[in-house]
Image (cartoon, rainbow, N blue to C red):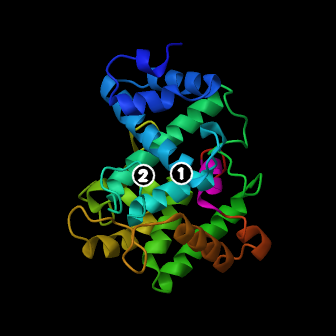
Amino acid sequence: MPGIGQIAGLRPRADVELLDALDHHTRRTVAAWLQDRPSAATRQACLQTLAAFLRWLQAAEPGLGLLAATGAHLDAYCEQARIGALTVGVRNPGRALSGATVARKHRALSSFYGFAWSIGAIRQGDGVAKPAHEPQSLAITREERRSLRHGACLLAADGRVAEAVAVALIEATGAGVATLAGLTSEDLHAVGHGSNDPLVLVTMRDDRGDVVTFPVPTWVHPWLRVLSSTRAAGDPLIKQGDGQPVSVGWLTTALRDAGSAGGIPAPRAELLHPRKLRAVTAAAPA
């Protein structure tokens, strides 16, 4: 496996040298991930994203290895990018990045840690895929998922429509926080114009940057119409009550509130977390 500097077309030199200075194991993992990207343009974007995150990580926790970072680090980095709190690894320190830009960064970094875990470079529980501060498992049951959906309805009835939509979409699709933050009305597509309630599809990008499409549950359609009617073209579809982009803390609170409202016992509801629910959505029964 070549070093970072031996992969053609990567720049700037400062980013290449930063990653090439990593320990042998981490450098080989980074190089393998970059080589696995589908195009030169994607490799270049991934290089810059990973180098920016590494600079932030080295400033935030000196001595912590790249492969030792957790989901908490990734969430903190993306949150600081959203609110303009980054002072290293960005072209304009102190300037907030757009929701779409943050979502792209999140996808790239999630892809790196997922790849590292898949090749055995990190053990499950060591990296972003399994944050140390979260419970080790959440085998959500079919009844609990139904309760969560019922709780989302109760949030909407209480005027918390954005939270209800966020909970419904993460439960139905397993979307990440950054993906939800980047959604706009243009990502919603009605199919079947002759129907009173046509099928609605939502398009998102997965951790590899590929476009994926999910059907939106019919009972969520009225909430989407409410949100869409108040959003200008290109504006985030889901916002916090203060108008700020979706954050991990906001969505975690929404999930736990929906769980409690839907009848999930408090100790279980407190275990709900966006990443945990995302991890089990594909495997859990509907």
Counting from the top left corner in percent of width and height, residue 264 is at 72, 72
Question: In the figure, is residue 36 to the left or right of 70?
Answer: left
| Mark 1 → mark 2, Cα distance in angstroms | 8 Å
Q: What residue type is labelled 2?
A: Val
Q: Which of 278 and 245 is in front in this view?
A: 245
Magenta span: chief secondary structure? helix
The crowd level at tag 2 (other Cα within 10 Å; few <14, some 14-19, many 20+) is: some
Residue at image position (32%, 31%) is 12
Dot 2 corresponds to which residue?
A: 88
Q: What residue type is labelled 1?
A: Ala
Is the residue 211 above or below the residue 216 in the image? above
The crowd level at tag 1 (other Cα within 10 Å; few <14, some 14-19, many 20+) is: some
Q: Point out the image quarter for the C terminus.
A: bottom right
Is the residue 269 above or below the residue 18 in the image? below
Residue 123 visible in the snapshot: yes
Circles 1 and 2: CB atoms closer than 8 Å? yes
Quarter where residue 246 is shown: bottom left
Magenta run includes residue 249: no
Dot 1 corresponds to which residue?
A: 59
Question: In the figure, is residue 237 to the left or right of 142?
Answer: left
How many labels were placed on the picture?
Answer: 2
Q: Nearer the viewer, residue 176 or 36?
A: 36
Counting from the top left corner in percent of width and height, residue 124 is at 72, 39
Residue 188 visible in the snapshot: no
Q: Point out the image quarter for the N terminus.
A: top right
Which residues, given as a range, are shown in magenta? Answer: 273-281
Counting from the top left corner in percent of width and height, residue 227 is at 33, 73
